[in-house]
Amino acid sequence: RVQLVESGGGSVQSGGSLTLSCQASMYMACMGWFRQAPGKEREGVAATVTGRGSTYYADSVKGRFTISQDNAKKTLYLQMNSLKPEDTAMYYCAAKEGIDCYAGAWFVLNRYKYWGQGIEVTVSS
């Protein structure tokens, strides 16, 4: 079973930056970041496919967030700049497996088999 552990969350003022990390117990080619704000459904934020150099972003974070992966360290990152209060949420790291890896649907929750416990990000105005 793959384990995913997020770190790097915290509180920041509007306009600030944070970098989230997700340490995986093994290398995973297809990974993503999701978030869930209080009272809202979990939504996709960013996804990446290693080897293809492909990245995908939700419209709400394009130009502000950057997803990257250090394969040697088995770590996924999410650099978040120009943070807004509406970015406040619990952020989750997730990984696909098998044929789902390259099947698109980058922000469909049930296509991801492994999930981290989540880490809180709070942006104050």
Image (cartoon, rainbow, N blue to C red):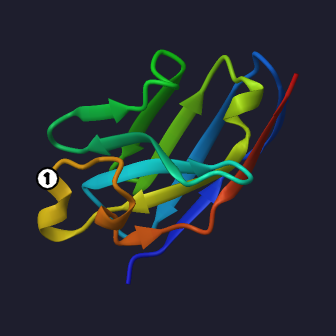
Looking at the rendered structure, the kind of residue marked 1 is: Tyr
Question: In which image quadrant can residue 113 be found?
Answer: bottom left
Number of marks in picture:
1
Quick check: 36 above or below 18? below
Q: Residue at x 40, y 49 (%)?
A: 32
In the image, 121 versus 17, the foreground residue is: 121
Picture quarter containing residue 6? Answer: bottom right
Q: Nearer the viewer, residue 44 or 32?
A: 44
Q: Is residue 83 above or below residue 103?
A: above
Q: Which residue is mark 1?
A: 102
Q: Would residue 8 be seen by someone viewing this image from the given angle?
A: no
Q: Viewer-proximal residue, 27 or 9?
A: 9
Q: Position of residue 59 (x, y in %)?
A: 43, 24
**Measuring 24% from the left and 49% from the top, which residue is drawn there?**
105
The residue at 18%/48% (across/down) is 104
Which residue is more in the foreground, 42 or 80?
Answer: 42
Image coordinates for residue 67, horizontal then vertical, percent: 43, 35
Q: Is residue 67 left or right of residue 52?
A: right
Q: Is residue 7 left or right of residue 28?
A: right
Quadrant assignment, res 82:
top right
Give the SS element for disc 1: helix
Residue 99 x, y percent position in the rendering: 11, 65
**Residue 80 image position (x, y, % from top left):** 60, 28
Question: For the C terminus, which image quadrant?
Answer: top right
Is residue 109 visible to us here? yes
